[in-house]
Image: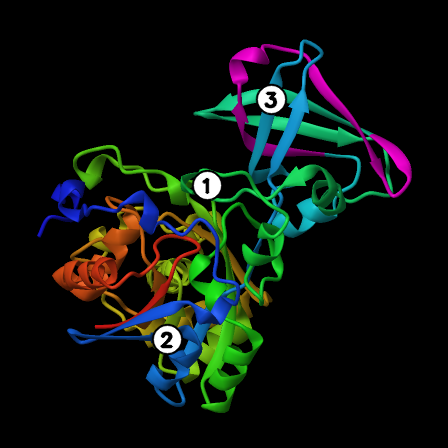
């Protein structure tokens, strides 16, 4: 199969609007879960997921945290301008960005751009009893996005503290509703830690402390990594062939200790969510790059969209993880920082992920391609069952455990 010749129309299905969950269940772990196991399907309640997981396995979670990335400003003319934070520019590092004081630069999408030809936008807001003036200035255009400088006149405030006050949590556009106060809690996983995403890793939204405790009791080891989910996760595939679709780039970090645990489990894992899948599978290709050239820079380690289909996979997943660990040791690093643009589509051979916990995805999406690559044409069987048995779809919808 020529991966690039895949037609996205072959990954379509009818999704009525009423099947899209506009709000989550009152209790996270009371959502339904569909268990697909080698062609067989059963359903249960999510809090029973541990009954379907093998003992002494490794389960990997994405600990990214959604930021309040939507900022609203108003011109003197009354025109409303929306600044949507996409990724840090100055400083480039996520951790440094959220600690920065007084000014920073982000790559942003701008809503109502035609009304903001020039000039600086300002906004005054009360924070902790002090009046703070925030200014935004457009610097340059980068494709469909813009670099924007944000500055504020309170040197005691970090950028993280600032957007927690002035920002709005960006819920998915297909919910067709405004963000509510409850979303600040329900649209974060209970284990979210590292700020940087503009969308939640939604497979993790079903987990509660009780469910995690049951997983621990079964002897399943839990590890975390970070992939900051970008707005591109909602980018529709508009081209007929996937060869014409540009995958978005997302930033990943994986600690040396997580890599060492992965090595102990022979580079095999249960992935919670497609973001964990994209990170884990990218690790193989990062290891392969270092196998071919141990002296690559961090930037050169980034996994490009079609790389898995252009490289000769001549090492095992275990060897790839060992190579990355050695790279970190040789460079006195405790964390691998990189990025991935990986396109996982039918014909892709999974290297590390053996089971997948995931929600039900949009028709004609790259996430549906990823699922199809995992369980083959049986994705039709899974989605037909979910539609016929009253499952709820998309970010706040129900869950599935896929075992190919």
Point 25% across, 66% down: residue: 350
Point 75% across, 30% down: residue: 151
Q: Which residue is mark 2?
A: 269
State the SS at label 1.
Answer: helix
- Relative to 135, residue 177 above or below: below
Rendering quarter of residue 103: top right
- Relative to 201, residue 306 above or below: above
Q: Main secondary structure of the magenta part?
A: strand
From the top left corner, tell me how far across and down residue 99 is, in percent.
Answer: 74, 48
| In this rendering, the label closer to the viewer, 1 or 2 | 1
State the SS at label 3.
Answer: strand
Point 49% across, 39% down: residue: 177
The magenta region covers: 104-132
From the top left corner, tell me how far across and down residue 115 is, in percent.
Answer: 57, 12
Of the 4 image quadrants, the one containing the C terminus is: bottom left
Going from N to C along the chain, the mark reached first, 3 or 2, is: 3
The alpha-carbon separation of the residues under discs 1 and 3 comes to: 18 Å
Q: How many circles with numbers are drawn on the protein?
A: 3
């Amino acid at each position: 199969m020529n991966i690039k010749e895949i037609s996205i129309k072959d990954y379509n299905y009818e999704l009525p609007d009423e099947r899209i969950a506009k709000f989550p269940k009152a209790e996270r772990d009371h959502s339904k879960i569909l268990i697909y196991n080698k062609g067989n399907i059963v359903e249960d309640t999510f809090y029973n997921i541990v009954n379907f997981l093998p003992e002494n396995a490794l389960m990997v979670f994405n600990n990214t945290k959604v930021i309040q990335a939507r900022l609203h400003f108003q011109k003197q003319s009354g025109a409303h301008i929306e600044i949507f934070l996409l990724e840090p520019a100055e400083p480039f590092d996520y951790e440094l960005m959220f600690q920065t004081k007084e000014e920073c630069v982000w790559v942003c999408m701008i809503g109502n751009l035609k009304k903001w030809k020039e000039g600086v936008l300002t906004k005054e807001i009360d924070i902790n009893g002090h009046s703070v003036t925030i200014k935004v200035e457009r610097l340059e255009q980068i494709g469909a996005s813009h670099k924007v400088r944000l500055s504020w006149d309170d040197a005691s405030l970090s950028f993280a503290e600032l957007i927690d006050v002035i920002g709005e949590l960006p819920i998915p556009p297909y919910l067709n509703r405004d963000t509510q106060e409850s979303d600040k809690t329900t649209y974060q996983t209970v284990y979210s830690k590292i700020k940087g995403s503009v969308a939640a890793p939604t497979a993790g939204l079903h987990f509660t402390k009780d469910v995690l405790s049951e997983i621990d009791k079964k002897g399943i080891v839990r590890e975390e990594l970070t992939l900051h989910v970008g707005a591109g996760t909602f980018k529709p595939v508009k081209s007929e062939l996937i060869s014409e679709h540009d995958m978005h780039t997302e930033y990943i970090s994986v600690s040396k200790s997580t890599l060492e645990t992965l090595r102990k489990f022979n580079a095999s894992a249960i992935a919670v969510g497609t973001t964990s899948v994209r990170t884990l599978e990218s690790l193989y290709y990062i290891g392969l790059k270092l196998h071919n050239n141990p002296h690559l820079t961090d930037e050169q380690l980034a996994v490009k969209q079609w790389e898995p289909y252009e490289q000769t996979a001549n090492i095992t997943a275990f060897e790839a993880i060992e190579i990355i660990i050695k790279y970190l040791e040789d460079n006195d690093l405790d964390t691998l920082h990189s990025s991935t643009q990986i396109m996982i589509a039918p014909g892709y051979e999974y290297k590390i992920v053996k089971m997948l916990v995931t929600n039900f995805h949009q028709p004609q999406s790259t996430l549906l391609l990823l699922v199809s690559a995992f369980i083959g044409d049986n994705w039709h069987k899974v989605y037909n069952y979910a539609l016929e048995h009253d499952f709820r779809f998309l970010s706040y919808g129900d869950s599935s455990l896929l075992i190919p």
